Structure formats: C-alpha cells, structure tokens
Amino acid sequence: MAKRLMATLSDTGLFLQEWMANPKRTGSVVPSSKRLAAAMARWLPANPDSYVLELGPGTGAVTEALLKHGLREEKLVAIERNPKLAGLLRERFPKAQVIAGDAWQMDVLLRNRHIENVGAVMSSLPLLNFSLEEAEALAQKIRAVLQPQGNWVQYSYGIHKLRPRGTADFHLHASKIVWLNLPPARVSVFQK
C-alpha cells in the first residue's frame, strides 16, 4: 500500500513538473484516475491478437488498466512525445513497444515496426489544445491505421460536448462522463 502511494505521488509530481514545462503538450496537471483508465480499457478489441495503439500514455495510468483488462503487453504500441515519460514507460512496461515520437506520425512509426493496423486506439491526447485542422489530421491518421469496426477511445475534459475535435467522420458508438477524475472527463468511443 505504501509503495503504491509513493508511486502515485511520484507520478503526480512528474506529471505536474512536465505540465509546468509545457502545458499545451502535457494537457493535464495530474495523471488519469483509475476510474477513467478503466472506462477506456473496457473497449479493448475482442481479438487478443490485435495490436492496441495508445497515444499520449504519460506515466502509464491507462496502460496499466489496459493490461489489467487483458491486453498482452507485447500487443501494446505506445507513442509518447515526451522523452522523459517515454523512458519511464519503457522501464515499467518492458515488453510493450514504447515510441518516443509524434502521434501525427503514427502511420510511419507503425510501419517501421511492421504493424499494418490496430484493433483499437486509446488516446489521452489533449484535443482541446490543438486546432481543428490538427485534430482532423490526427483523426485521418487514426482512420488509416484502425481496423474495420475498431474503436478509437478518446477522453476529453470538455464534458459538455459528445464529440471532441476531429471526430466528425467517425460513428459515435458510446459516451460516458467519469465524474471521479480530476477534472471530470468524458470518454467517447468512435468507430470508422
């Protein structure tokens, strides 16, 4: 219990430090709550051989939930722009493919690893921090790598909107507000 508390405090401190260094890039002051992570992880693909792409995993709160919900670590590809956080993720999840890179380059990054498509995209990227054009460009990249009927799971702190930026060309499959998160967040599930 004490070890888990220390890890949580350490993650929160690191997140806050990275947010202060670049608030637009980090997008949140604290890591996702266990409830938010679990709300996302329940949308894993049914096929256990499908890869899952996680965008903006931060310190790994959602990553941990994905693994607890049955994702095999070697089927996880995580793209984290912050090199410090990517290094932390590699230590915590050594069997996953953690890439220090730009999510807008996901197609090239996946192709370099001989991965043609993914069964789900789990995104913690702060879409509200990006222009509509940037969000739409990201959505097109997601559409290109997502398998048919695959899920794009995105959370947003803009809980008053069912659809975050860039999601207009996707079918809204489900949406839920997670109130026990700081701040509350809406988890939306899209299919192409």
Image: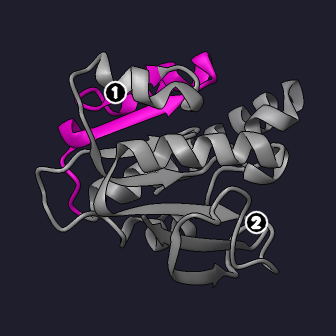
Q: Tell me which colouring the rendered structure shows.
A: one colour
The disc at residue 61 is: none
Q: Residue at x 54, y 51 (%)?
A: 123
In this view of the protein, which residue sits in the foreground, 169 or 19?
Answer: 169
Residue 28 as seen in the image, left or right of residue 171: right
Looking at the picture, does residue 142 appear above or below residue 46?
Answer: above
Confirm whether the magenta stretch covers residue 29: no
Say whether disc 2 or disc 1 marks the residue closer to the N-terminus: 1
Instruction: Compute the Cα span from label 2 to label 1.
Output: 32 Å
Give the residue number, with chain letter if any, for mark 2: 182
Q: Residue at x 11, y 50 (%)?
A: 49
Residue 118 as seen in the image, left or right of residue 56: left
Q: Tell me, yes or no, if residue 27 can be seen here.
A: no
Q: Quadrant of residue 16?
A: top right
Residue 173 position within the rendered picture, expressed as x and y whole percent measured from the top left = 47, 80
Residue 48 as seen in the image, left or right of residue 12: left
Per the rendered image, the range of residues in magenta is: 70-99
Residue 50 position within the rendered picture, expressed as x and y whole percent measured from the top left = 18, 50
